[in-house]
Image (cartoon, rainbow, N blue to C red):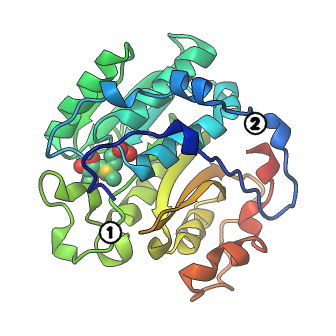
């Protein structure tokens, strides 16, 4: 997590793994081969990302999230989102990359971008990052999506979140400044568990949520919660560093899904969630997503 001093999104090491589980249908042809030059032109340039010592610098998890969006670029462009939202925007690297990517794919005016952060310095930093890349988003310094929830209920087509997911003592959650970037409470789930119902309320019928999780967060259980809301999911990017194993999971509403999630895997260990998921109904219809 974010304790790095100098960061480069090393394009030579970008590896995007699209993992389709469940139905066994893989449709690799829908995904472009992303060369470093294409990636550079569709994501924010690190050297133009504003920084502040109390704001999370783009790190492996930020890069994984942007790589997931790039891997899903064709689908995102095809979605023609009207409203996109990042919760917890930090430096603005992710929302800026998303705006650049969609602007280059579907042109200017059609999509409006919003980003929130509880850290006011992050909100300011994001504004500068967006400006330096010539794209725009409305930035709101707020807790999660407070202030947006009522007016945007059921309207948001894309939500992206790299939440504070590090397991910490509960009293560190919600602290000021940089601590808010990583402090995730018990199993790193305190903030994540607040985000899930909010995302569900905000997402439109065609809406997608992309969320970074750590193995310690028990992503299988996160998928189960979202399944109860009627979502299917797949892993778009999976990446292991020396310290952690990250997954970027994409969720979408699955009209064929019953409301009650299977509880048969209750109690499974997080380390085995991938193999369990491959047998789960969560992944039904993944070839369209
Ligand atoms: C891991 S950092 C990610 C920053 C950025 N999205 C990125 O990927 O580089 C998590 C961000 O969430 C913000 N955050 C934490 N709790 C929040 C809350 N309750 N509401 C809004 N933002 C929050 C933090 O301030 C931090 O900027």
SS for dot 1: helix
Q: Is residue 175 left or right of residue 3?
A: left
Whether residue 221 is visible: yes
Question: Of marks 1 and 2, which one's residue comes earlier in the chain?
Answer: 2
Identity of the residue drawn at 67% across and 72% down: 274
Picture coordinates of residue 6, whole percent (x, y): 28, 43
- Are discs 1 and 2 less than 8 Å apart at CB? no
Which label number is shown at residue 31?
2
Q: Residues within 10 Å of mark 2 (few under 14, many from 20)?
A: some
Query: Where, quadrant-wise, is the C terminus in this rendering?
Result: top right
Q: Is residue 71 left or right of residue 97?
A: right
Residue furthest front in the image: 12
**With respect to residue 35, does 242 lie above or below?**
below
Residue furthest bottom in the image: 267
Whether residue 152 is visible: no
**With respect to residue 17, does 49 lie above or below?**
above
Front residue of this view, candidates 282 and 256: 282
Q: Residues within 10 Å of mark 1 (few under 14, many from 20)?
A: many
* Residue at numbered disc 1: 190
Picture coordinates of residue 211, whole percent (x, y): 49, 53
SS for dot 2: loop
Identity of the residue drawn at 46% across and 50% down: 199
Front residue of this view, candidates 261 and 129: 129
Identity of the residue drawn at 64% across and 32% down: 73
**With respect to residue 46, does 87 lie above or below?**
below
């Amino acid at each position: 997590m974010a304790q790095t001093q100098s960061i480069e999104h090393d394009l030579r090491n970008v590896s995007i793994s699209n993992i389709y589980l469940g139905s066994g249908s893989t449709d690799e042809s829908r995904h472009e081969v992303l060369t470093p030059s294409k990636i550079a032109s569709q994501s924010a340039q690190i050297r133009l990302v504003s920084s502040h010592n109390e704001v999370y610098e783009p790190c492996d998890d930020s890069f994984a999230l942007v790589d997931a969006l790039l891997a899903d670029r064709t689908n995102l462009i095809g979605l023609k989102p009207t409203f996109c939202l990042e919760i917890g925007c930090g430096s603005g690297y992710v929302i800026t990359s998303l705006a650049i990517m969609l602007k280059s794919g579907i042109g200017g005016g059609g999509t409006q971008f919003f980003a929130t952060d509880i850290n006011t310095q992050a909100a300011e930093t994001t504004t500068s990052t967006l400006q330096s890349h010539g794209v725009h988003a409305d930035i709101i310094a707020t807790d999660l999506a407070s202030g947006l929830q009522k007016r945007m209920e059921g309207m948001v087509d894309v939500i992206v979140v790299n939440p504070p997911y590090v397991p910490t003592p509960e009293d560190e959650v919600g602290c000021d400044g940089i601590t808010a970037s990583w402090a995730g409470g018990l199993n790193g789930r305190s903030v994540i568990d607040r985000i899930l119902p909010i995302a569900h309320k905000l997402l439109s019928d065609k809406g997608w949520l992309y969320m970074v999780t750590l193995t310690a967060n028990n992503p299988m259980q996160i998928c189960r919660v979202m399944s109860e809301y009627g979502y299917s999911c797949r892993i778009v990017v999976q990446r292991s560093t020396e310290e952690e194993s990250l997954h970027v999971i994409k969720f979408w509403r699955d009209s064929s899904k019953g409301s009650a999630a299977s509880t048969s895997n209750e109690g499974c260990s997080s380390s085995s969630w991938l193999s369990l998921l491959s047998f789960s109904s969560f992944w039904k219809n993944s070839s369209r997503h």
